[in-house]
Amino acid sequence: MSRKGGSRFANPRAAFQPQAKEPPVPAALIKTARKSGQLNLSNRGLSEVPQSVWRINVDPPEESHLNVSFSASDCWWDQTDLNKLILASNKLQCLSEDIQLLSALTVLDVHDNQLTSLPCAIGQLLDLQKLNISHNKLKELPDELWNLKSLKSLHVHHNELERIPEGIGQLVHLEELDVSNNQLSTIPSTLGELSGLLRFNLANNKLKSIPMDISKMRSLKLLDATHNELECVPPELAKMVSLEQLYLRHNRLHHLPEFPSCKYLKELHVGNNQIEYLGSEHLKYLSAISVLELRDNKLKSLPDEILLLQGLERLDLTNNDISSLPYELGNLPKLKSLLLEGNPLRAIRRDIINRGTQELLKYLRSRIEEQPTHHGDSCPATAMTLPSESRTTMYAIGTQKVLEYSDKKATVVPDEVFDVSDRTLITSVNFSKNLFTEVPSRIAELKATVTDVNLGFNKLSSVSLELCTLERLIHLDLRNNLLTSLPMEMKRLQRLQTVILSFNRFKEFPDALYHVPALETILISNNQVGSIDAIQLMELDKLTTLDMQNNDLMQIPPELGCCINLRALLLEGNPFRNPRAAILARGTTAVLEYLRSRIPT
């Protein structure tokens, strides 16, 4: 048989000889890392880290032994020490003690491996700022970890940790800490020493309580304790003055703490708990709240104070036991999402709920004027009813400096209410939800201290001059009355920042308001105002919010577009043709720009 045709297979095994195995870390990658100080070895199937990586800072490159000349850019003795090492998504079960040779590291990412422990030498990486050891099989953390005083970000989530050592309190520069998805049943009180922490994630553990020392985290902006076994939240939590987002979903909470210091809280998520009661004390301090999530609880009603949450954009009440809602909910100016599915609401048909938030809010507004002013079995409050309420009144005056006499269906304020106020400095007055036809004259006695007055939901047809003597007044609520005008004497209220006049009977924009330069918010929706003087309004250079929805404005003066400080201009529900609905839907900036374009030149 001729062998010519098969000469290229003279060695039949040659085709099957193993090729030279490529190193797990190509030399070119190491060379680049020497220049950049960064090495990314993620998702390479590594079961161990090559020694060349650990020794990259101390061993000269192989080419340095060759008789070659180096360009200026290739001088290995001028290399950059490794400062960023990414070993994520490999099969590493341990890290070598040689990690101490990488003393310049500022970022170490070994997430998504099979690590069961960390080397003690990790404590020698004193420049380390970011450490990600999440998605491993760690059961404990070495004490040496707490030597890393420069650490700003520590991710240990998705491990098997049952405890966090108290030494964690030594990481005083930590800004981000994620210990979620472990097996933690307690956390150490020393966490309170992390006063610079901004974000703290405790979700998906087995925590039954949170130590009160956590209130020392005065810089904390986000706290997530979702999916734990919390039955209560320490009231000290309310001392976190910087808190913006709080997640307490899927726990066993029966009630909420008050939040007197959380003036920056924007999002509160407490769904999937066992909360039965939500009171005014829980809401009155939440002036910055935009998201309130209360779904899957046992709430039976909402306090009327929810109407004070003027910045609320999303309210989730899904799957509660609520049978009725305050119709005034429809007046919240920024509410874009109202979720009510799964409640035994009697007064709102399901088809209305199914139409979406805007139709639902429109329906609620339509029902406001249909509400009965009082029930047949309600008796006006008099001085005879005061003694039984005196403890509550004195508590409010003593602790909150609030003179409270609201929701009494009363026609007058008993003298005894004003008499007890002599004992302290009153800053806030709440006489809302009564049947007053005039402003109580003795309110003038509080002119030296009072800054906040609520006379909403009464039968006032005029504003007395006594009210105009409260020259320290900052907030004035006169919504849902019978007012048609305001006295010019109101221009004496030079500190007034917010005035609420919605749901009255104004046919003209109150001229007095043009002369109050401190005004920041004017809410005068749902009246019959036919025009507005944009030239005078431009003089209110601090005005940021103007709500004139549902009035009788036939046209919008183009000069209104020059009120460039306006951040919220609400004009929907008026009979004017321009700006068109499509422009209104694009928001305040677009409306102001459109109006300016219409100014005659």
Image: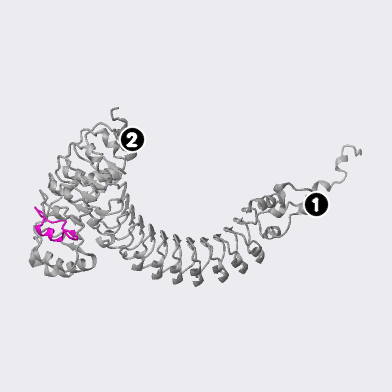
Q: Is residue 583 visible?
A: yes
Which part of the image, by quadrant, shows the C terminus?
top left
Q: Residue at x 45, y 68 (%)?
A: 193
Q: Residue at x 19, y 65 (%)?
A: 425
Residue type, label 1: Leu
Q: Main secondary structure of the magenta part?
A: loop
Q: Is residue 587 visible?
A: no
* Residue that protrudes farthest toward the right in the picture: 1
Q: CA distance from mark 1 to mark 2?
A: 69 Å
| Disc number for residue 465 | none
Rendering quarter of residue 230: bottom left
Q: Which residue is mark 1?
A: 66
Rendering quarter of residue 297: bottom left
Is 282 placed left or right of 116 in the picture?
Answer: left
The image shows residue 356 at horizontal and vertical percentages of 30, 44
Q: Residue at x 10, y 57 (%)?
A: 440
The stretch in magenta equals: 429-449
Up/down of 332 relative to 450, above or below: above
Q: Which residue is mark 2?
A: 593
Please tell me whether residue 49 belongs to the stretch shown in magenta.
Answer: no
Is 88 placed left or right of 54 in the picture?
Answer: left
Q: Nearer the viewer, residue 100 or 377?
A: 100
Q: Give the crowd class for mark 2: few <14, some 14-19, many >=20 residues within 10 Å.
A: some
